[in-house]
Image (tube, rainbow, N blue to C red):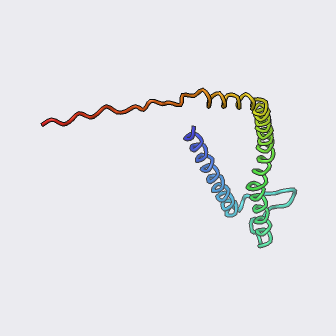
Amino acid sequence: MKTLFKALFVMAALFAVLAVAGGFTLLHGLRDASDVHVVMNGHEMFWDSDLGDLIGAGVGLAIAGVVLCVVVPLALLLGLALPLLIVGGLVAAGVVAVLSVGAVLGSPLILLGLILFLVLRNKRRQKITPPPSPEPRL
C-alpha cells in the first residue's frame, strides 16, 4: 500500500511540473505569436506586464500559498481530528471512572484475598540442589 501512495504522489508531482511547464510554454508562445489576441470583457490582454502587475501577481500567489499550506490543514485538523480527539478523551475518562469505581467497591475483597494469600502460602520452600557433577576420568 505504501508503494501505491508513493507512485500516486510521484505522478501528481510530475503532472504539477508538467502543468507549470505547459503554462510557461503557452505564455511565451502567445507572446511570440502576433496573430493571437486574448480578449477579456472587451479589453485586449497584452503580455507586456509592468512591475505593478508582477507585484500584484506575486502577492496573490503568496496569499494563495499561505491559504493552501496553513489554512486548509488547520481547517481539516480542527474539523476532523479535534472532534475525534474529544470523543476519544471522553471514552477514556469513562473507562477510568468505571475502573475506579470497581477498584473502590472491590477493595475489601482485594484486601481479604491479600490477607488469605499471606496467611495460607507455603512458607517452606524446598531448595533444589543440582546433582553433583561427575568427576572426570582419564
Image quadrant where residue 104 sits:
top right
Quadrant in the rendering for residue 24: bottom right
Query: What is the residue that sits farthest to the bottom in this orientation?
Result: 51
Residue at 79% from the left image edge and 54% from the top image edge: 71
Point out residue 134 in the picture as x, y percentages from the top left corner. 23, 33
Residue closer to the observer: 115 or 15: 115
Seen in the picture, residue 85 relative to 58 is either above or below; the reply is: above
Residue displayed at 76% across by 61% down: 61
Q: Residue drawn 79% across and 30% down?
A: 105
Q: Is residue 105 left or right of residue 4?
A: right
Q: Is residue 96 left or right of residue 29?
A: right
Q: Nearer the viewer, residue 99 or 21?
A: 99
Nearer to me, 114 or 88: 114
Q: Nearer the viewer, residue 45 or 115?
A: 115
Q: Quick check: 48 above or below 107?
A: below
Q: Residue furthest left?
A: 138
Q: How far across and how far down the image is residue 51, in percent?
A: 77, 73
Query: In the visual, does 68 lie left or right of 134?
Result: right
Residue 131 position in % (x across, y down): 31, 31
Residue located at (73% from left, 27% from top):
109
